[in-house]
Image (cartoon, rainbow, N blue to C red):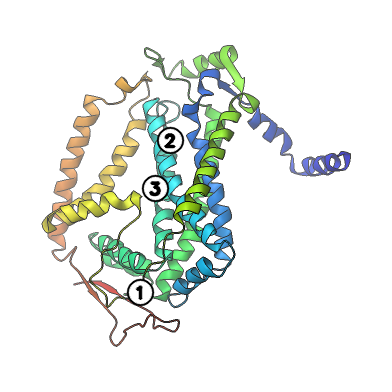
């Protein structure tokens, strides 16, 4: 034991991380926030760690090429010991992570934690949610079965409807005019390198802000947030009612995170991995691609909207959604931290005015590009892939008319 202590001291003398770690572990939190309502952020971080570990293991065998991706997943499912379980852990971990992040954001909103001085913490959390959804979509593409192939086709069609930049954006995403080997390589790079790197950076910044600004106090009716006096009042609250995060508050986070991991493992053992379903074949057009649950709302919206409303909805919806997600943090420099104070009439009126402005802007942009949103899908000339190991690279063109 003394030998390990000497090794630890040797590293600490050179890295100077021991004091910072001890300070982070012992930082005080209000005693009432050491409750089960505040465990979802830690659970999301734990699931992200699970995704990193299982993703690295899967990347050792997965082959990101149009001809080999489907076969490599079949090899994982049937020939690698517990390969199917590893895939199920990774796939269901993605579903659990999206759900836990959404619950965490709802809890933060209901408890008024987006108000001063934590507005930027909320905005970073919104970006983390969007990147989590990006990880989920790119991971679904890497299955490269019928659902993934045509789901990517729908995603490319949606992207192509963006005025002025739609066609170049599709070419950049797909690596060319068709879904082919370059497409899978690009989505593999997005899923394994770019988006996880951004996630790690934003998670680190998010945690740093939580440590610097403190965990939001328990929401109570009548408690006023005043910019001039809030920080002084918060530090006074910590002196009177604060407890160290370790061991005072961390045990609930650890128990809930462990329960989530166990739940993921049970679901993985019971339900098994997602796909892959049929080999991706662009000649089979009578197919109904089904997205994972976090994109079912978009699937239902496109199915229920009349054709002439699809493009305006797709152009207006994402920007207005992001504006609504970020709008709570900007005007609320003061006010009560309770649910009754969260929705304000002025904010709803501003959101309605913003939506009307977005409709007019989308109409003007569509007038500039009358063919925007009309996409032609075609298979490459002469290519009819067989469902074999040596199949030709499947493709599907998405070139705006």
Front label number (2 vs 1)? 2
Label 3 secondary element: helix
- Compared across the picture, whether 245 is left or right of 401 comes to right
Quadrant assignment for the C terminus: bottom left
How far apart are the two marked residues, 3 and 2, measured between alpha carbons?
14 Å
Q: Nearer the viewer, residue 117 or 394?
A: 394
Quarter of the figure with the N terminus: top right
In this orientation, which residue lies closer to the viewer: 272 or 253?
272
N-term mark: 3 or 1: 3
Residue position marked by numbered label 1 in the rendering: 176
Q: Residues within 10 Å of mark 2 (few under 14, many from 20)?
A: many
**Residue that protrudes farthest toward the right in the picture:** 2
Q: Which mark, by number, is residue 210?
A: none
Between 391 and 352, the one lying in front of the other is 391
Image coordinates of residue 32 in percent, x first then y, are: 51, 19
Q: Measured from the top left, where is residue 271 in percent x and y?
A: 44, 54
Mark 3 or 2, closer to the camera: 2
Q: Is residue 336 above or below residue 169?
A: above
- Is residue 315 visible to us here? no
Mark 3 Cα shell of 10 Å, populated few (<14), some (14-19), many (≥20): some
Q: Is residue 342 above or below residue 122?
A: above
Give the total of numbered labels.
Answer: 3
Q: Which residue is mark 3?
A: 130
Identity of the residue drawn at 26% across and 52% down: 298
Circle 1 sits in a helix, a strand or a loop, which is it?
Answer: loop
Secondary structure of the residue carrying numbered label 2: helix
Please give the residue where the numbered disc 2 appears in the rendered image.
104
Q: Earlier in the sequence, mark 3 or mark 2?
A: 2
Which class describes the residues within 10 Å of circle 1: few (<14), some (14-19), or many (20+)? some
């Amino acid at each position: 034991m003394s030998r390990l202590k000497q090794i630890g001291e040797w590293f600490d003398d050179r890295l100077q991380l021991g004091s910072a770690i001890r300070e982070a572990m012992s930082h005080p939190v209000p005693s009432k926030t050491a409750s089960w309502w505040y465990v979802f952020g830690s659970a999301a971080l734990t699931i992200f760690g699970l995704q990193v570990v299982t993703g690295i293991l899967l990347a050792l065998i997965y082959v990101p090429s149009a001809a080999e991706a489907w076969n490599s997943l079949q090899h994982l499912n049937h020939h690698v010991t517990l390969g199917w379980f590893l895939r199920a852990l990774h796939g269901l971990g993605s579903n659990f992570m999206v759900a836990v992040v959404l619950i965490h954001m709802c809890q933060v909103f209901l408890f008024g934690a987006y108000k001063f001085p934590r507005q930027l913490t909320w905005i970073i959390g919104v970006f983390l949610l969007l990147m989590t959804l990006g990880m989920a979509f790119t991971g679904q593409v890497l299955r490269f079965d019928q659902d993934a192939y045509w789901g990517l086709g729908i995603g490319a069609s949606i992207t192509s409807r963006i005025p002025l930049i739609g066609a170049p954006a599709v070419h950049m995403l797909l690596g060319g005019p068709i879904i082919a080997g370059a497409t899978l390589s690009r989505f593999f790079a997005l899923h394994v390198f770019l988006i996880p790197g951004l996630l790690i950076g934003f998670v680190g910044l998010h945690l740093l802000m939580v440590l610097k600004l403190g965990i939001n106090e328990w929401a109570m009716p009548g408690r006023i947030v005043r910019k001039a006096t809030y920080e002084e009042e918060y530090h006074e609250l910590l002196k009177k009612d604060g407890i160290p995060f370790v061991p005072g508050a961390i045990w609930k986070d650890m128990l809930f995170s462990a329960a989530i991991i166990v739940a993921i493992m049970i679901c993985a053992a019971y339900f098994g991995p997602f796909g892959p379903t049929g080999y991706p074949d662009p000649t089979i057009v009578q197919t109904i691609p089904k997205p994972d649950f976090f994109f079912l709302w978009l699937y239902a919206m496109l199915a229920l909207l009349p054709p002439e409303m699809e493009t305006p909805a797709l152009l207006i919806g994402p920007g207005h959604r992001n504006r609504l997600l970020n709008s709570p943090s900007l005007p609320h420099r003061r006010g009560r931290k309770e649910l009754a104070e969260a929705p304000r009439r002025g904010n709803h009126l501003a959101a309605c005015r913003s939506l009307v402005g977005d409709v007019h802007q989308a109409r003007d942009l569509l007038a500039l590009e009358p063919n925007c949103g009309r996409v032609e899908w075609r298979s490459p000339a002469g290519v009819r892939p067989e469902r074999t190991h040596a199949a030709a690279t499947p493709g599907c063109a998405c070139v705006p008319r």
